[in-house]
Image (cartoon, rainbow, N blue to C red):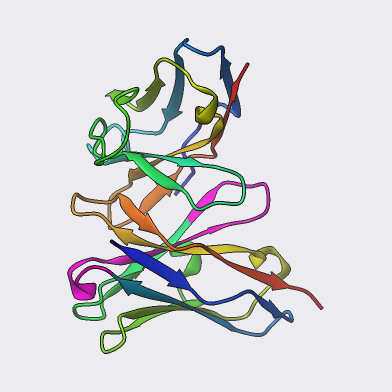
């Protein structure tokens, strides 16, 4: 069965960076994109972008270009999302989600990682 | 890219049907067949329930169905059950490798 397990909660100061990991199991890691989605408390879902573990290609939502880096390590079936220059409005739960075998849907999700930005 | 528009809330009694709309533009929902719907319980990760407008992943009850007309997609939950009380989000491919979500609809079972 497919599982995505994310790293634990983080507390960061404004201006710092955070790196969240997402370890995949139960499928061939390089066969599906990994997407990142965030959700501020009481708010909706916001798509950050995707990374292709097969070749490292990425595509970021315009809003996050220059501030988000997405990488993967195929040797340990893990994807990473790093967000820099953190602001208070980056406080949110960050999810990794596998791109489905169709197109542009996310069929399996990690449990989420709470990132809190506070001075 | 602007978020898709969903009503903030919807409700129905057990056994009834509830329809949730998701309005986009001719650049996203109106142009592509890649509309998805997700169900989310409080404190939990979203779960895919509809993809490519009207396809259901394995294990999703056929009480959930999707459709699309012009720039608006819809999710219908038939035979409403208590366990259907959750938040529902739509998403669409928006071109240029981008995905956009709706703001979410809270469904209450009366």
Tell me where residue A71 appears, x and y as whole percent. 36, 82
- The residue stretch that appears in magenta: A26-46
At 49% from the left and 43% from the top, the residue drawn is: B3
Drawn side of residue A27 relative to residue B106, left or right: left
The vertical placement of B77 against B30, above or below, is above
In the image, residue A39 lies in the stretch drawn in magenta? yes
Tell me where residue B30 appears, x and y as whole percent. 29, 31
Quarter location, residue B107: top right
Drawn side of residue B42 relative to residue A25, left or right: right
At 20% from the left and 75% from the top, the residue drawn is: A30
Q: Quadrant of the C terminus of chain B?
A: top right
In front of the other: A59 or B20? B20
- Can residue A61 be seen by looking at this rendering? no
In front of the other: B85 or A59? B85
The vertical placement of B53 against B38, above or below, is above
At 39% from the left and 67% from the top, the residue drawn is: A4
Residue furthest to the bottom? A75
Tell me where residue A16 appears, x and y as whole percent. 66, 85
Quarter location, residue A75: bottom left
The vertical placement of A74 against A111, above or below, is below
At 61% from the left and 51% from the top, the residue drawn is: B43
Quarter location, residue A114: bottom right
In front of the other: A2 or A119? A2
Tell me where residue A20 appears, x and y as whole percent. 51, 78
In the image, residue B1 lies in the stretch drawn in magenta? no
Count of number-bearing discs: 0
Residue furthest to the right? A119
- Can residue B102 be seen by looking at this rendering? yes
């Amino acid at each position: 069965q497919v599982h995505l397990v994310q790293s634990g909660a983080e507390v960061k100061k404004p201006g710092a960076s955070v790196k969240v990991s997402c370890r995949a199991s139960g499928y061939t890691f390089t066969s599906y994109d990994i997407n990142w989605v965030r959700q501020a408390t009481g708010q909706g879902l916001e798509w950050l972008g995707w990374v292709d573990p097969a070749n490292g290609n990425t595509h970021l939502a315009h809003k996050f270009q220059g501030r988000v880096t997405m990488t993967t390590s195929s040797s340990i079936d893990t994807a990473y999302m790093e967000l820099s220059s953190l602001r208070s409005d980056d406080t949110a739960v960050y999810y990794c989600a596998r791109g489905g075998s169709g197109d542009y849907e996310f069929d399996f999700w990690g449990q989420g990682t709470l990132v809190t930005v506070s001075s | 890219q602007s978020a898709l528009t969903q009503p903030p809330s919807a409700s129905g009694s057990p056994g009834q049907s509830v329809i949730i709309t998701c309005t986009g533009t001719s650049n996203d929902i109106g142009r592509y067949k890649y509309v998805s719907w997700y169900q989310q319980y409080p404190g939990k990760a979203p779960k895919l329930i509809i993809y490519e407008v009207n396809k259901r992943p394995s294990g999703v009850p056929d009480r959930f169905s999707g459709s699309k007309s012009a720039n608006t997609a819809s999710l219908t939950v038939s035979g409403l059950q208590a366990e259907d009380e959750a938040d529902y989000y739509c998403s669409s491919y928006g071109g240029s490798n981008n995905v956009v979500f709706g703001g979410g609809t809270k469904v209450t079972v009366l």
